[in-house]
Image (spheres, helix red, strand yellow):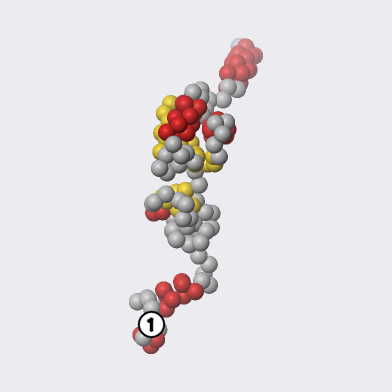
């Protein structure tokens, strides 16, 4: 009986390996920055993306130049589909400013960003030798020598 159990386990493992090979796409939200000028541009982008297989909902915000696609889609395929409409597109480069430690440092601040957003910069911390940081700590209540300077 031991040999038959081992053989049945081996066969069942082979069967499960073949069924696991299919990749299941995960539900995700892809955000893309697209320059849209008119209702026609907005409609063209929305129709192109909503016709994709796996796209559950499409939200187009022309004021922010932003397209959000939720569904079982791959980000690169969504970007390629938006670019096929003739529009210049890139992944959404902004995050809400309250999620960044120093939102108005040179790497993160962007004048083109919609209100309430800053650029998603990797290095959004000022250098420790920055002049503005020295002045802040110079007149701080936590500085024991602050009274002698004032």
Q: Is residue 81 visible?
A: yes
Task: Please name whichever residue, 67 or 72, is drawn nearer the observer in this view of the structure.
Answer: 67
The residue that disc 1 covers is 146
Q: Secondary structure under badge 1? A: helix
Q: In this view, does 36 lie above or below 147?
A: above
What residue is drawn where x is 56% and y is 25%? 23
x and y percentages locating residue 45 in the rendered image: 48, 31
Classed neighbour count for the residue bearing mark 1: other residues with Cα under 10 Å, few (<14), some (14–19), many (≥20):
few
x and y percentages locating residue 117 in the rendered image: 42, 51
Q: Is residue 101 above or below residue 81?
A: below
- The quarter of the image holding the C terminus is bottom left
- The quarter of the image holding the N terminus is top right
Q: Is residue 18 left or right of residue 69?
A: right
In the rendered image, the residue lying farthest to the bottom is 148
Task: Please name whichever residue, 146 or 16, is drawn nearer the observer in this view of the structure.
Answer: 146
Task: Please name whichever residue, 72 or 33, is drawn nearer the observer in this view of the structure.
Answer: 33
What residue is drawn where x is 45% and y is 51%? 113
- Label count reads 1
Q: In this view, does 131 lie above or below 22?
A: below
x and y percentages locating residue 19 in the rendered image: 58, 18
Q: Is residue 29 visible?
A: no
Q: Quadrant of residue 77?
A: top right
What residue is drawn where x is 57% and y is 31%? 84
Task: Please name whichever residue, 8 or 99, is drawn nearer the observer in this view of the structure.
Answer: 99
x and y percentages locating residue 135 in the rendered image: 44, 76
What residue is drawn where x is 38% and y is 82%? 146
Q: Quadrant of residue 145?
A: bottom left
Q: Is residue 65 above or below residue 7?
A: below
């Amino acid at each position: 009986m031991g040999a038959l159990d081992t053989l049945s386990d081996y066969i069942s493992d082979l069967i499960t390996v073949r069924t696991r090979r299919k990749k299941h796409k995960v539900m995700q939200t892809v955000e893309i920055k697209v320059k849209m000028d008119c209702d026609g541009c907005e409609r063209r982008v929305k129709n192109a993306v909503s016709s994709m297989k796996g796209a559950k909902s499409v939200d187009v915000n022309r004021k922010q130049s932003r397209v959000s696609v939720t569904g079982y889609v791959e980000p690169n395929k969504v970007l390629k589909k938006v670019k096929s409409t003739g529009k210049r597109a890139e992944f959404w480069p902004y995050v809400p400013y309250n999620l960044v430690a120093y939102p108005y440092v040179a790497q993160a601040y962007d004048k083109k960003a919609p209100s309430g957003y800053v650029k998603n910069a990797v290095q959004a911390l000022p250098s420790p030798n920055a002049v503005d940081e020295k002045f802040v700590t110079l007149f701080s209540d936590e500085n024991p020598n602050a009274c002698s300077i004032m």
